[in-house]
Amino acid sequence: MTLELQTSLSTDSSLDNTSLGSWDFVPELTTTATEPAPPERGNGNSNGDNWERHPQAHRTRTLAPNLTRRSHKKSRGGCYSCKSRKIKCGEQKPACGSCAIKGLNCTYPTEPVKRQSSSSARGNDRTSTTSHTLAVLRRNPTTGPSFSANETAFGSGGGAEGRTFSMLDMRFFHHFLTIAYPHLPVGNDTVWVHEIPQFAERHGYLMHAILSLGASHLSRLTGVDYRRESLVHRGQAIAGLNQALSQWQTARRYGESDAMLAACYALTFQALYMGDGLADFVTMVRGCALTTEKIRHDNSPTAFNLQPDYHLECMAPRLQQLPSVDPRLLEDAGRALDEIRPYMSDTDDDNDRNDHDTELDFHDALVDAVAGLQASPASGYLQFISIYGVWYEMPHDRFKTFLDPDNLVAQLLLAYFVCLQLLMVPLAAHEWPHRADILRVRVLSGTVEWAEAIFDRLEASDLRGLLDWPREIIAIVRAEINGQVLQSTPVLQLHLAENNLSPQSTVLMAL
């Protein structure tokens, strides 16, 4: 909690702090039950006799002495946000205290539900029901419905103006919430499935990023072609994200920084499922790092836990459980990387020298990761995640040159990176131990296509002879994805998870 939020909590006397208490999540306790009056005798009703014969059935009920009723006013006209979260609303206008703290859109019913006398209700049952329904369904005109794609509900720059989301989009949204949401930052799964969908209602580009990820993942998983839908959402997400980043301010409301970072991560993971998404993946990985660093520097309020050491704190108990990688594959990778080094020779041109240094740094990071895996799985894991830092530290001009498709040496190094990333799949699965599922291995086809595209690009160059190791890795992974019998050491090591099939996985297998 930032200093500003702490000050507002202490100075705003109108804020009902009891609305944030744990008692708002349980039914209201009743301390006494009013004893009904006994019926009069002599009216021919036998209930009077029953009253005398069974007086214990009507005795006053009391709670234990240690259970006392908390005096409070029941909230009947609360905002939609508090009702959906099942907490007591302070009913402050224009925004209640709970929504103000969370930075949520606070919307009240436009018309309170009016109580009618029994006599008038008997004559106007149909009218009363209709007016009550309209009062509940009607939203504040300034906010619009939850999934309306107007500018107010989704924010300018989201690219969703004048568009209504379809039922297919709702399927993508559901798929994101249940299966496809990112597992990074590690230890933030709850944020992804609870807070991020709420932020997406106010930030249109985040909703488009969510839908694009859901569409791409579902397409890879089921074989149904949703590429057109995913690319449309991706384009709108990137446009809105760029606008949000260009308007970055130091003081931000709760949720705004999360929306930008969540969109970066969603677009990064979506690139994994795009056959031509390697450059997008590298760019968005760099964007995630830059955005995270900016949030930390500005001390922006965020739902994500972005403490610098939190990733390693979460992974520390799991590092000793990481599986090892086949030594032969690692030895071949080390020899192949040594053969690449002469192609990154020094040059007298300053620009070429800078490019050489960038490629050399990336090459050294790959070598360190292979050497770390040879030492131990834990060491290899730590060395591999440091590879992403090389992209983050590159100056913009060098980074642009590194991703140039005509930079054949960099393309060769990226082919080795892709294959090394596939070798890391059994280890990286421990970042999401409760969600890893071998029946979803087909989503890795996009990553395989990255490498195959590089093979085609380098086929006519002098570097094609250095692709033997990457080609072997890709052939093995292709066979594992297709369920073929392997004649060599597995890369994905799917046998490690065969005993952990979930009922949901069995259903997905039939899709």
Image (spheres, helix red, strand yellow):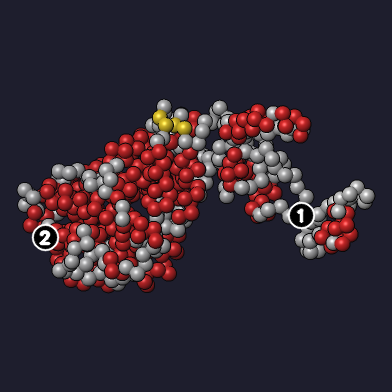
307, 64: nearer the viewer? 64
Q: Amino acid at mark 1?
A: Thr
Q: Nearer the viewer, residue 317 or 434?
A: 434
Tell me the residue that label 1 is attached to.
30
**Which residue carries the number 2 mark?**
468
Q: Position of residue 339 (x, y in %)?
A: 12, 61
Residue 510 in the image: state x and y as whole percent. Answer: 31, 55
Name the residue located 16 percent from the left edge and 60 percent from the top edge.
Answer: 475
Q: In the rendered structure, which disc, 1 or 2, sits on the residue that comes first in sequence?
A: 1
Q: Residue 129 in the image: x percent, y percent?
A: 64, 33
Query: At 22% across and 71% down in the image, what residue appears?
Result: 326
Q: Which mark is residue 362?
A: none
Question: Badge 1 local density, few (<14 within 10 Å), some, or many (20+)?
Answer: few
Left or right of 442, for residue 151: right
- Pointer 1 with pointer 2, Cβ within 8 A: no
Residue 285 horizontal side relative to residue 178, left or right: left
Label 1 residue SS: loop
